[in-house]
């Protein structure tokens, strides 16, 4: 079942990210990493916009 699903992801995927870790700890870690990236990107764009407006 998983093998067929992964084959389809590879064949028909359009650059999407796929997580195959089914544990709650893995999901929690991944979400924290995403949140950190989002905060970092938001801070970077705000700093950039402020410097451009001065």
Image (cartoon, grey):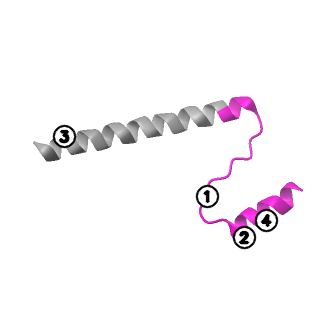
Under circle 2, the secondary element is: helix
Residue that badge 2 annotates: 11
Residue that badge 3 annotates: 50
* Label located before the other in sequence (1 or 3): 1
Under circle 3, the secondary element is: helix
Tell me the quadrant of the picture where the C terminus can be found: top left
Q: CA distance from mark 1 to mark 3?
A: 32 Å
* Label located before the other in sequence (1 or 2): 2
Is residue 7 part of the magenta span, yes or no?
yes
Task: Give the magenta range.
Answer: 1-27
* Label located before the other in sequence (3 or 2): 2
Residue 14, position as x, y percentages in the image: 61, 66
Tell me the quadrant of the picture where the N terminus can be found: bottom right
Under circle 1, the secondary element is: loop
Residue furthest bottom as drawn: 11
Residue that badge 1 annotates: 16
Give the quadrant of residue 29: top right
Residue furthest front as drawn: 53
Give the quadrant of residue 11: bottom right
Asked whether disc 2 touches disc 4, contact meaning CB atoms under 8 Å apart, the reply is yes
Q: CA distance from mark 3 to mark 2?
A: 43 Å
């Amino acid at each position: 079942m998983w093998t067929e699903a992964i084959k389809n992801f590879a064949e028909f995927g359009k650059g999407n990210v796929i997580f195959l870790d089914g544990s709650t700890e893995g999901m929690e870690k991944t979400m924290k990493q995403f949140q950190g990236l989002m905060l970092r990107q938001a801070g970077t764009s705000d700093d950039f916009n402020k410097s451009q407006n001065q």
